Image (cartoon, rainbow, N blue to C red):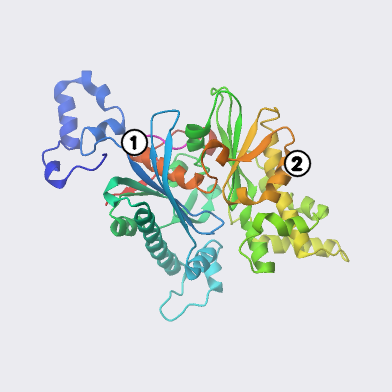
Amino acid sequence: MTKLLPADEIKNTPDLHSVADTQTELGSDIESDFLSLSDTLEQTLFESFDDGLYIGMMSGTSLDGMDAVLCRFHDDTTTPMQLVASYSQDFPQRLREVLLALCQPNGVSQLTPTDDEPNSELDWFGWASKQYAEFASDVVNTLLEQSNIDADAVLAIGCHGQTVRHRPQMGFTLQLVDANIIAERTGISVVSDFRRRDMAVGGQGAPLVPAFHQALFATHDSTRVLLNLGGIANITVLPANGKDQVIGYDTGPANLLLDAWSLLHTGKDYDAYGAWAQSGQVIEPLLTQLLTHPFFAQSHPKSTGREDFNLAWLQDELQKFASKNTGASCSAADVQATITELTAMTTGTQIRSFVEQSDSAVYVCGGGALNTYLLTRLQAHLPKCKVTTTADLGLDPTWVEAVAFAWLAQKTLMGETGNLPAVTGAHKGVVLGQVCFA
């Protein structure tokens, strides 16, 4: 099993300084032995991290809960990943309310704090970081208990944290989580803060999962497109020949608008199977208006989030539409149908620019993979492609992103790059994340 060496063995293990001294003494002929971070780690306190159990955790922009997976990765190309166990848990109501508020600039001003709660945005950020970590720790411990796996058998947790601000044009992104708490509560080392290292070398910090998609799903036989329909929609294009660069970027809103509009008008957190949207009619002039959002015209690499697309933005667009179309009537279901079409059209248009062959396939993952009406509309925009879900590739669409961050955690511990510069726009590949050792 891959693990940190016991404390009583560390004193007999050469540290980085002694390794450097040894290199000097032995001469330049052994410098190649220490060219990579992984080589150095293997010569110091660490054994190999390539084979063992990892936990991946993800809560996306839809904020519908925390997904956690326990998996093992293999070098065997026929079975590169084994999903051992999975678990999902809804956020506690108050934590979700606060996270949603933090996602909007000055959003916490709408919160009514109790006597023991914060009253400023920065204090709310600290409160939510702690509460998020405590909740994540409970999710991990439940996952381990249900799978009958001891924490000592797990090499690391890859925890993405909750994105509360993503400003690539300003060069920063904020994922809220206190990894120290998770490490203490679970006894497992935690890798977090994956995105900012990519930004430090000029990248968007997103999307990060295309590297995982390439490792797990690419094939020489046909071009594959992975479409993640979370709060935001993003695509990964995996070329058939294996030589062309992988392409990946955000295409626009998905579940975050659909869920918000559903909750506002039906009291339900989401539009199950897209049935409500299917009952309405697409408002074509409104759809045309929504498509004028400047994000859709940007070239990739690009990424977006709740800062650009949110319920307030939609309501503002509806007010503009009503003022220009006096006398026009449209139901809430018609609006749901229209924003469903917005997601189907924007994703379909982008995918079509890369694949037109009849042997190409689009594999959908994320919560939107369960929206059968949305997938029907997507298929209508991609008549030459097969639209299905990642279940056909052997991985349930619910767990793809969580598995991706388990994989990224492994890459971090092995000192291997986790970003794809062609996808994020970074100047170079870098090792992602920060490690909080248990």
In magenta stretch: residue 419: yes
Image spot of residue 22 (x, y percent): 15, 28
Q: Residue furthest right?
A: 327
Counting from the top left corner in percent of width and height, residue 435 is at 33, 47
Contact? badges 1 and 2 (CB < 8 Å): no
Can residue 301 be spotted in the picture?
no
- Say whether residue 203 is left or right of residue 313: left
**Main secondary structure found in the magenta portion:** loop
**Residue 415: which disc?**
1
Q: Quadrant of the N terminus?
A: top left
* Magenta residues, start to end: 416-420
* Res. 148 visible in picture: yes
Dot 2: element: helix
Q: Which residue is mark 2?
A: 380
In the rendered image, residue 435 lying in the magenta stretch gets the answer no
Label 1, label 2: how far apart the Cα atoms are = 43 Å
Residue located 52% across and 70% down the image: 108
Camera-side residue: 72 or 346? Answer: 72
Tell me if mark 2 has few (under 14), some (14-19) or many (20+) residues whose alpha carbon lies within 10 angstroms of its own: some
Q: Quadrant of residue 331?
A: bottom right
Q: Observer-nearest residue: 111 or 5?
A: 5
Above or below 40: residue 306: below
Which residue corresponds to the image point at 51% horizontal and 65% vertical from the top-left? 96
Three-letter code, disc 1? Gly
* Kind of residue at disc 2: Ala
Q: Nearer the viewer, residue 303 or 387?
A: 387
Position of residue 176 measured from the top left corner of the image (x, y, whole percent)? 44, 58
The one nearer the camera, 426 or 146, is: 146
Q: Check residue 284 in the rendering and tell me which mark sits there, or answer none.
A: none
Left or right: 197 in relation to 321? left
Q: Is residue 255 above or below residue 344?
A: below
